[in-house]
Image (cartoon, rainbow, N blue to C red):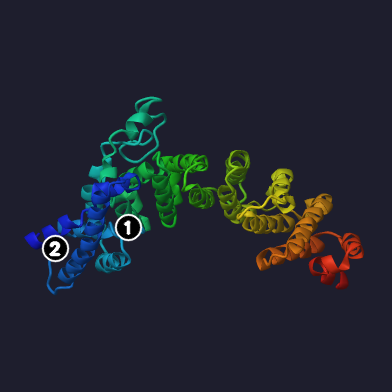
Amino acid sequence: MSENLELLLHNLRVPTDYARIQHITEDSALVHLDEWKDSAERVLTELELILNQKNLELSLTSQADVIQAAASFDGQDSWVTPIGRTTAQGILRHFDDLPQSQLTQILNHNVKPLFQFNPHPNLNASGRKLPRPAGGPMATHDFYDDQMWKAAPGVVNLVSWCIRHVHRDWYETLWHLVIPPVMALLDDFEAHNKLRGVGIVSEMLREVPSQLLRRTGVDGLIRSSLNTCLTHLNDTEAPQLIEAAVDAYLTLTLLTTEVGSSEQFDQLCALLGEGVIRGIWLYASDRPDVVLASLRALPPLLRTLKIGNARFLKVLITQLLHPLKTNVASPWLDDIQIASLRLLSILIEECAPCIPRWKTTILDAVARCWVTLKDSGKTCPGLNSALRHTCNLLGQCVMMENEYRQLLEMDEKMFEGLVGSEEKSR
Protein backbone atom coordinates (compact mmCIF):
# COMPACT_ATOMS: atom_id res chain seq x y z
CA MET A 1 0.00 0.00 0.00
CA SER A 2 1.38 3.43 -0.96
CA GLU A 3 2.07 5.96 1.78
CA ASN A 4 -0.48 8.34 0.23
CA LEU A 5 -3.23 5.71 0.28
CA GLU A 6 -2.31 4.68 3.80
CA LEU A 7 -2.54 8.30 4.96
CA LEU A 8 -5.94 8.76 3.32
CA LEU A 9 -7.31 5.65 5.01
CA HIS A 10 -5.91 6.80 8.35
CA ASN A 11 -7.67 10.15 7.95
CA LEU A 12 -10.97 8.37 7.31
CA ARG A 13 -10.99 6.55 10.64
CA VAL A 14 -14.13 7.73 12.41
CA PRO A 15 -13.17 9.44 15.71
CA THR A 16 -14.18 7.48 18.80
CA ASP A 17 -15.94 10.58 20.15
CA TYR A 18 -18.76 9.99 17.67
CA ALA A 19 -19.76 6.96 19.74
CA ARG A 20 -20.72 9.32 22.57
CA ILE A 21 -21.57 12.46 20.64
CA GLN A 22 -24.99 12.77 22.30
CA HIS A 23 -23.19 13.23 25.62
CA ILE A 24 -20.60 15.77 24.42
CA THR A 25 -21.33 19.33 25.55
CA GLU A 26 -17.97 21.04 25.01
CA ASP A 27 -18.17 23.40 22.04
CA SER A 28 -14.52 22.88 21.15
CA ALA A 29 -14.98 19.13 20.89
CA LEU A 30 -18.06 19.49 18.68
CA VAL A 31 -16.29 21.99 16.44
CA HIS A 32 -13.37 19.58 16.07
CA LEU A 33 -15.72 16.78 15.02
CA ASP A 34 -17.45 19.04 12.48
CA GLU A 35 -14.08 19.99 11.02
CA TRP A 36 -13.14 16.32 10.71
CA LYS A 37 -16.47 15.55 9.02
CA ASP A 38 -15.87 18.28 6.44
CA SER A 39 -12.32 17.08 5.78
CA ALA A 40 -13.55 13.48 5.39
CA GLU A 41 -15.58 14.59 2.35
CA ARG A 42 -12.42 15.80 0.65
CA VAL A 43 -10.46 12.70 1.61
CA LEU A 44 -13.15 10.42 0.19
CA THR A 45 -12.99 12.33 -3.09
CA GLU A 46 -9.21 11.86 -3.21
CA LEU A 47 -9.63 8.16 -2.50
CA GLU A 48 -12.15 7.78 -5.30
CA LEU A 49 -9.77 9.47 -7.75
CA ILE A 50 -7.02 6.99 -6.83
CA LEU A 51 -9.33 4.01 -7.31
CA ASN A 52 -10.39 5.30 -10.73
CA GLN A 53 -6.80 5.12 -11.96
CA LYS A 54 -6.15 2.54 -14.64
CA ASN A 55 -3.91 -0.44 -13.88
CA LEU A 56 -4.21 0.14 -10.15
CA GLU A 57 -3.35 -3.03 -8.26
CA LEU A 58 -4.14 -3.48 -4.58
CA SER A 59 -3.52 -6.44 -2.33
CA LEU A 60 -6.43 -8.17 -0.60
CA THR A 61 -5.43 -6.44 2.64
CA SER A 62 -5.38 -3.01 1.00
CA GLN A 63 -8.73 -3.63 -0.68
CA ALA A 64 -10.21 -4.70 2.65
CA ASP A 65 -8.91 -1.52 4.28
CA VAL A 66 -10.38 0.63 1.51
CA ILE A 67 -13.75 -1.09 1.87
CA GLN A 68 -13.65 -0.61 5.64
CA ALA A 69 -12.93 3.10 5.26
CA ALA A 70 -15.63 3.70 2.64
CA ALA A 71 -18.27 1.50 4.27
CA SER A 72 -17.98 3.58 7.44
CA PHE A 73 -19.70 6.37 5.50
CA ASP A 74 -22.40 4.19 3.94
CA GLY A 75 -25.11 5.06 6.45
CA GLN A 76 -27.17 7.77 8.13
CA ASP A 77 -24.76 8.43 10.99
CA SER A 78 -23.82 11.74 12.56
CA TRP A 79 -20.38 11.73 10.90
CA VAL A 80 -21.78 11.19 7.39
CA THR A 81 -22.66 14.05 5.05
CA PRO A 82 -24.82 13.54 1.94
CA ILE A 83 -21.84 14.23 -0.32
CA GLY A 84 -19.62 11.93 1.72
CA ARG A 85 -22.19 9.13 1.53
CA THR A 86 -22.54 9.46 -2.23
CA THR A 87 -18.76 9.42 -2.71
CA ALA A 88 -18.37 6.42 -0.39
CA GLN A 89 -21.02 4.50 -2.29
CA GLY A 90 -19.20 5.26 -5.52
CA ILE A 91 -16.01 3.81 -4.02
CA LEU A 92 -17.82 0.71 -2.81
CA ARG A 93 -19.25 0.05 -6.26
CA HIS A 94 -15.71 -0.92 -7.28
CA PHE A 95 -16.15 -3.97 -5.04
CA ASP A 96 -19.73 -5.00 -5.83
CA ASP A 97 -18.58 -8.29 -7.35
CA LEU A 98 -15.99 -9.17 -4.76
CA PRO A 99 -15.02 -12.87 -4.45
CA GLN A 100 -15.57 -14.88 -1.29
CA SER A 101 -11.86 -14.71 -0.46
CA GLN A 102 -12.02 -10.92 -0.28
CA LEU A 103 -15.08 -10.93 1.96
CA THR A 104 -13.37 -13.49 4.19
CA GLN A 105 -10.39 -11.15 4.43
CA ILE A 106 -12.60 -8.27 5.55
CA LEU A 107 -14.48 -10.33 8.14
CA ASN A 108 -11.29 -11.93 9.45
CA HIS A 109 -9.00 -8.93 9.62
CA ASN A 110 -11.24 -5.85 9.76
CA VAL A 111 -14.31 -7.03 11.69
CA LYS A 112 -13.36 -9.99 13.90
CA PRO A 113 -10.55 -8.26 15.85
CA LEU A 114 -13.01 -5.66 17.13
CA PHE A 115 -15.49 -8.25 18.45
CA GLN A 116 -13.37 -11.21 19.51
CA PHE A 117 -12.58 -9.92 23.00
CA ASN A 118 -16.29 -9.94 23.87
CA PRO A 119 -17.46 -13.41 22.79
CA HIS A 120 -21.20 -13.90 22.89
CA PRO A 121 -22.06 -16.08 25.90
CA ASN A 122 -24.53 -18.19 23.89
CA LEU A 123 -22.31 -18.91 20.86
CA ASN A 124 -19.39 -21.29 20.41
CA ALA A 125 -16.43 -20.64 18.11
CA SER A 126 -18.21 -22.10 15.08
CA GLY A 127 -21.30 -19.90 15.49
CA ARG A 128 -23.56 -22.54 17.04
CA LYS A 129 -25.83 -22.00 20.02
CA LEU A 130 -24.40 -23.33 23.27
CA PRO A 131 -26.61 -25.55 25.45
CA ARG A 132 -26.03 -23.12 28.32
CA PRO A 133 -24.34 -19.68 28.55
CA ALA A 134 -20.55 -19.89 28.68
CA GLY A 135 -19.37 -18.50 32.00
CA GLY A 136 -22.66 -19.09 33.79
CA PRO A 137 -25.57 -16.74 34.50
CA MET A 138 -23.30 -13.71 34.99
CA ALA A 139 -21.58 -14.10 31.64
CA THR A 140 -23.68 -11.32 30.12
CA HIS A 141 -21.92 -8.77 32.33
CA ASP A 142 -18.56 -9.81 30.88
CA PHE A 143 -20.06 -9.56 27.39
CA TYR A 144 -20.74 -5.86 28.00
CA ASP A 145 -17.34 -5.04 29.54
CA ASP A 146 -14.77 -3.15 27.45
CA GLN A 147 -16.61 -3.47 24.15
CA MET A 148 -13.76 -2.67 21.76
CA TRP A 149 -16.05 -2.43 18.74
CA LYS A 150 -17.68 0.68 20.16
CA ALA A 151 -14.36 2.49 19.86
CA ALA A 152 -14.72 2.10 16.07
CA PRO A 153 -18.14 3.66 15.32
CA GLY A 154 -17.95 2.91 11.60
CA VAL A 155 -17.73 -0.85 12.10
CA VAL A 156 -21.52 -1.22 12.27
CA ASN A 157 -21.83 0.09 8.72
CA LEU A 158 -19.04 -2.28 7.67
CA VAL A 159 -20.86 -5.28 9.16
CA SER A 160 -24.02 -4.21 7.33
CA TRP A 161 -22.11 -3.90 4.05
CA CYS A 162 -20.60 -7.35 4.50
CA ILE A 163 -23.97 -8.97 5.19
CA ARG A 164 -25.40 -7.42 2.03
CA HIS A 165 -22.58 -9.01 0.03
CA VAL A 166 -22.70 -12.54 1.44
CA HIS A 167 -24.04 -14.89 -1.21
CA ARG A 168 -26.45 -17.59 -0.10
CA ASP A 169 -23.98 -20.43 -0.67
CA TRP A 170 -21.20 -18.60 1.25
CA TYR A 171 -23.00 -18.62 4.59
CA GLU A 172 -21.90 -22.15 5.55
CA THR A 173 -18.24 -21.18 5.21
CA LEU A 174 -18.50 -17.70 6.70
CA TRP A 175 -21.00 -18.43 9.48
CA HIS A 176 -18.42 -18.32 12.30
CA LEU A 177 -17.33 -14.87 11.08
CA VAL A 178 -20.78 -13.47 10.32
CA ILE A 179 -22.94 -14.35 13.31
CA PRO A 180 -20.80 -13.09 16.27
CA PRO A 181 -20.85 -9.39 15.26
CA VAL A 182 -24.52 -9.62 14.26
CA MET A 183 -25.50 -11.04 17.66
CA ALA A 184 -23.25 -8.56 19.46
CA LEU A 185 -25.24 -5.71 17.95
CA LEU A 186 -28.61 -7.37 18.41
CA ASP A 187 -27.96 -8.14 22.10
CA ASP A 188 -26.29 -4.85 23.03
CA PHE A 189 -27.79 -2.97 25.96
CA GLU A 190 -28.08 0.28 24.00
CA ALA A 191 -31.27 0.61 21.96
CA HIS A 192 -29.65 2.36 18.99
CA ASN A 193 -27.25 -0.56 18.54
CA LYS A 194 -30.13 -3.02 18.88
CA LEU A 195 -31.93 -1.13 16.13
CA ARG A 196 -28.93 -1.46 13.82
CA GLY A 197 -28.67 -5.12 14.78
CA VAL A 198 -32.31 -5.75 13.86
CA GLY A 199 -31.75 -4.04 10.52
CA ILE A 200 -28.73 -6.21 9.79
CA VAL A 201 -30.63 -9.36 10.79
CA SER A 202 -33.37 -8.39 8.33
CA GLU A 203 -30.74 -8.04 5.62
CA MET A 204 -29.28 -11.43 6.53
CA LEU A 205 -32.67 -13.17 6.43
CA ARG A 206 -33.01 -12.33 2.73
CA GLU A 207 -30.26 -14.80 1.80
CA VAL A 208 -29.33 -17.03 4.73
CA PRO A 209 -30.45 -20.69 4.35
CA SER A 210 -33.19 -21.59 6.80
CA GLN A 211 -31.57 -24.98 7.45
CA LEU A 212 -28.40 -23.26 8.67
CA LEU A 213 -30.34 -21.12 11.14
CA ARG A 214 -32.16 -24.14 12.54
CA ARG A 215 -29.17 -26.49 12.58
CA THR A 216 -27.02 -24.04 14.52
CA GLY A 217 -29.83 -23.02 16.88
CA VAL A 218 -29.29 -19.38 15.96
CA ASP A 219 -32.94 -19.02 14.90
CA GLY A 220 -33.92 -19.40 18.56
CA LEU A 221 -31.25 -16.95 19.70
CA ILE A 222 -32.39 -14.32 17.23
CA ARG A 223 -36.04 -14.87 18.14
CA SER A 224 -35.27 -14.42 21.84
CA SER A 225 -33.27 -11.26 21.13
CA LEU A 226 -36.07 -9.80 19.01
CA ASN A 227 -38.49 -10.44 21.87
CA THR A 228 -36.14 -8.51 24.15
CA CYS A 229 -36.22 -5.60 21.70
CA LEU A 230 -39.96 -5.30 22.34
CA THR A 231 -39.28 -4.59 26.02
CA HIS A 232 -37.19 -1.46 25.43
CA LEU A 233 -40.21 0.82 25.76
CA ASN A 234 -38.61 3.86 27.37
CA ASP A 235 -35.86 4.46 24.82
CA THR A 236 -35.99 7.17 22.20
CA GLU A 237 -35.59 4.51 19.52
CA ALA A 238 -38.47 2.40 20.87
CA PRO A 239 -40.97 3.11 18.03
CA GLN A 240 -38.49 2.27 15.25
CA LEU A 241 -37.17 -0.69 17.22
CA ILE A 242 -40.65 -2.17 17.69
CA GLU A 243 -41.59 -1.89 14.02
CA ALA A 244 -38.27 -3.35 12.89
CA ALA A 245 -38.29 -6.18 15.46
CA VAL A 246 -41.85 -7.29 14.69
CA ASP A 247 -41.08 -7.35 10.97
CA ALA A 248 -37.85 -9.32 11.49
CA TYR A 249 -39.56 -11.77 13.88
CA LEU A 250 -42.29 -12.46 11.33
CA THR A 251 -39.75 -12.94 8.53
CA LEU A 252 -37.66 -15.29 10.70
CA THR A 253 -40.71 -17.37 11.64
CA LEU A 254 -41.91 -17.71 8.06
CA LEU A 255 -38.39 -18.66 6.97
CA THR A 256 -37.72 -21.33 9.61
CA THR A 257 -41.15 -22.98 10.05
CA GLU A 258 -43.51 -24.84 7.75
CA VAL A 259 -46.60 -23.03 6.52
CA GLY A 260 -49.62 -23.95 8.61
CA SER A 261 -47.60 -25.90 11.18
CA SER A 262 -48.34 -25.75 14.89
CA GLU A 263 -44.78 -24.49 15.43
CA GLN A 264 -45.40 -21.52 13.16
CA PHE A 265 -48.76 -20.78 14.76
CA ASP A 266 -47.29 -20.94 18.28
CA GLN A 267 -44.45 -18.56 17.39
CA LEU A 268 -46.79 -16.05 15.76
CA CYS A 269 -49.15 -16.23 18.73
CA ALA A 270 -46.22 -15.66 21.10
CA LEU A 271 -45.28 -12.52 19.17
CA LEU A 272 -48.81 -11.14 19.23
CA GLY A 273 -49.85 -12.34 22.68
CA GLU A 274 -46.69 -12.01 24.77
CA GLY A 275 -44.75 -9.46 22.77
CA VAL A 276 -47.45 -6.96 21.83
CA ILE A 277 -50.62 -7.48 23.87
CA ARG A 278 -49.13 -8.43 27.25
CA GLY A 279 -45.95 -6.45 26.65
CA ILE A 280 -46.21 -3.23 24.69
CA TRP A 281 -49.91 -2.51 25.20
CA LEU A 282 -49.78 -3.33 28.90
CA TYR A 283 -46.69 -1.30 29.80
CA ALA A 284 -46.55 1.50 27.21
CA SER A 285 -50.00 3.04 27.51
CA ASP A 286 -48.32 6.35 28.39
CA ARG A 287 -46.22 6.28 25.19
CA PRO A 288 -48.60 6.99 22.29
CA ASP A 289 -45.70 6.93 19.84
CA VAL A 290 -44.83 3.41 20.96
CA VAL A 291 -48.45 2.25 20.79
CA LEU A 292 -48.73 3.72 17.30
CA ALA A 293 -45.58 1.89 16.22
CA SER A 294 -47.01 -1.40 17.45
CA LEU A 295 -50.25 -0.80 15.55
CA ARG A 296 -48.37 -0.01 12.35
CA ALA A 297 -46.27 -3.15 12.73
CA LEU A 298 -49.18 -5.57 13.05
CA PRO A 299 -50.96 -5.76 9.64
CA PRO A 300 -48.63 -8.41 8.12
CA LEU A 301 -48.81 -10.47 11.32
CA LEU A 302 -52.61 -10.39 11.45
CA ARG A 303 -52.80 -11.28 7.75
CA THR A 304 -50.51 -14.24 8.36
CA LEU A 305 -52.47 -15.50 11.36
CA LYS A 306 -55.76 -15.31 9.40
CA ILE A 307 -58.57 -16.96 11.39
CA GLY A 308 -56.00 -17.64 14.13
CA ASN A 309 -56.58 -14.06 15.27
CA ALA A 310 -59.82 -15.36 16.83
CA ARG A 311 -57.68 -16.55 19.73
CA PHE A 312 -57.08 -12.92 20.67
CA LEU A 313 -60.21 -11.35 19.20
CA LYS A 314 -61.71 -10.04 22.44
CA VAL A 315 -58.59 -8.21 23.56
CA LEU A 316 -57.75 -7.03 20.03
CA ILE A 317 -61.17 -5.51 19.38
CA THR A 318 -61.27 -3.94 22.84
CA GLN A 319 -57.85 -2.35 22.32
CA LEU A 320 -58.59 -1.15 18.79
CA LEU A 321 -61.95 0.39 19.66
CA HIS A 322 -60.65 2.25 22.70
CA PRO A 323 -59.00 5.14 20.78
CA LEU A 324 -62.14 5.54 18.66
CA LYS A 325 -64.17 6.39 21.77
CA THR A 326 -61.69 8.66 23.53
CA ASN A 327 -62.17 12.41 23.78
CA VAL A 328 -58.70 13.14 25.14
CA ALA A 329 -56.88 15.58 22.86
CA SER A 330 -53.55 14.27 21.60
CA PRO A 331 -51.37 15.03 18.58
CA TRP A 332 -51.10 11.25 18.12
CA LEU A 333 -54.83 10.49 18.23
CA ASP A 334 -55.69 10.76 14.53
CA ASP A 335 -52.81 8.49 13.51
CA ILE A 336 -53.64 5.97 16.24
CA GLN A 337 -57.29 5.93 15.21
CA ILE A 338 -56.42 5.39 11.54
CA ALA A 339 -53.95 2.60 12.42
CA SER A 340 -56.54 0.99 14.72
CA LEU A 341 -59.20 1.08 12.00
CA ARG A 342 -56.81 -0.52 9.53
CA LEU A 343 -56.24 -3.43 11.93
CA LEU A 344 -59.95 -3.62 12.69
CA SER A 345 -60.66 -3.96 8.97
CA ILE A 346 -58.17 -6.83 8.74
CA LEU A 347 -59.85 -8.61 11.65
CA ILE A 348 -63.28 -8.18 10.02
CA GLU A 349 -61.95 -9.79 6.83
CA GLU A 350 -59.88 -12.57 8.40
CA CYS A 351 -62.24 -13.48 11.26
CA ALA A 352 -65.56 -13.00 9.45
CA PRO A 353 -67.29 -15.97 11.15
CA CYS A 354 -66.60 -14.42 14.57
CA ILE A 355 -67.66 -10.85 13.77
CA PRO A 356 -71.48 -11.04 14.11
CA ARG A 357 -71.32 -11.05 17.91
CA TRP A 358 -69.12 -7.92 17.78
CA LYS A 359 -70.99 -5.98 15.11
CA THR A 360 -72.92 -3.59 17.40
CA THR A 361 -69.85 -2.98 19.58
CA ILE A 362 -67.79 -2.09 16.51
CA LEU A 363 -70.50 0.07 14.97
CA ASP A 364 -71.03 1.96 18.24
CA ALA A 365 -67.34 2.91 18.48
CA VAL A 366 -67.08 3.81 14.77
CA ALA A 367 -70.22 5.97 14.95
CA ARG A 368 -68.98 7.76 18.07
CA CYS A 369 -65.67 8.50 16.38
CA TRP A 370 -67.52 9.77 13.30
CA VAL A 371 -69.69 12.13 15.37
CA THR A 372 -66.68 13.43 17.30
CA LEU A 373 -64.83 14.07 14.03
CA LYS A 374 -67.77 15.91 12.46
CA ASP A 375 -68.52 17.97 15.59
CA SER A 376 -64.87 19.03 15.87
CA GLY A 377 -64.92 20.61 12.44
CA LYS A 378 -61.51 19.08 11.66
CA THR A 379 -60.55 18.00 8.18
CA CYS A 380 -59.00 14.55 8.33
CA PRO A 381 -59.51 12.71 5.03
CA GLY A 382 -57.52 9.69 6.21
CA LEU A 383 -59.68 9.12 9.27
CA ASN A 384 -62.90 9.88 7.36
CA SER A 385 -61.98 7.30 4.71
CA ALA A 386 -60.92 4.69 7.31
CA LEU A 387 -64.22 4.98 9.20
CA ARG A 388 -66.19 4.69 5.98
CA HIS A 389 -64.13 1.69 4.83
CA THR A 390 -64.70 -0.09 8.14
CA CYS A 391 -68.46 0.30 7.82
CA ASN A 392 -68.37 -0.98 4.24
CA LEU A 393 -66.45 -4.10 5.30
CA LEU A 394 -68.73 -4.65 8.26
CA GLY A 395 -71.75 -4.48 5.98
CA GLN A 396 -70.19 -7.01 3.62
CA CYS A 397 -69.35 -9.39 6.45
CA VAL A 398 -72.64 -9.40 8.41
CA MET A 399 -76.19 -8.16 7.97
CA MET A 400 -76.15 -4.49 9.04
CA GLU A 401 -79.28 -3.28 7.23
CA ASN A 402 -81.28 -2.61 10.41
CA GLU A 403 -78.39 -1.00 12.29
CA TYR A 404 -77.52 1.34 9.41
CA ARG A 405 -81.18 2.25 8.91
CA GLN A 406 -81.47 3.13 12.61
CA LEU A 407 -78.48 5.46 12.36
CA LEU A 408 -79.97 7.24 9.36
CA GLU A 409 -83.37 7.56 11.05
CA MET A 410 -81.66 9.03 14.10
CA ASP A 411 -79.70 11.68 12.15
CA GLU A 412 -79.54 11.26 8.38
CA LYS A 413 -77.49 14.40 7.86
CA MET A 414 -74.85 13.21 10.33
CA PHE A 415 -74.56 9.57 9.23
CA GLU A 416 -75.27 9.81 5.50
CA GLY A 417 -71.54 10.09 4.82
CA LEU A 418 -70.79 7.06 6.99
CA VAL A 419 -73.45 4.50 6.00
CA GLY A 420 -75.84 6.33 3.67
CA SER A 421 -74.74 4.94 0.34
CA GLU A 422 -74.34 1.53 1.88
CA GLU A 423 -77.98 1.64 2.97
CA LYS A 424 -79.17 2.82 -0.42
CA SER A 425 -77.30 0.12 -2.26
CA ARG A 426 -79.22 -2.62 -0.44
Q: Which residue is mark 1?
A: 161
**Quadrant of the drawing holding the C terminus:** bottom right
Q: Which residue occupies 74% across, 44% down?
A: 314
Mark 2 lies on a secondary structure that is: loop
User: What amino acid type is highlighted by mark number 2?
Assistant: Leu
- Distance between mark 2 and mark 1 Cα atoms: 20 Å
Vertical placement of 168 versus 283: above or below? below
Q: Looking at the image, can residue 390 be seen?
A: no
Q: Is residue 206 left or right of residue 91?
A: right
Mark 1 lies on a secondary structure that is: helix
The answer to which quarter of the image holds residue 406 is: bottom right
The location of residue 44, given as percent across then percent down, is: 21, 65
The location of residue 330, given as percent across then percent down, is: 63, 53
Q: Looking at the image, can residue 161 be seen?
A: yes
User: What amino acid type is highlighted by mark number 1?
Assistant: Trp
The answer to which quarter of the image holds residue 67 is: bottom left
Instruction: Pick the residue in front: 64 or 141.
Output: 141
Q: Which residue is mark 2?
A: 58
Q: Which residue occupies 38% across, 34% down?
A: 122
The location of residue 372, given as percent across then percent down, is: 76, 58
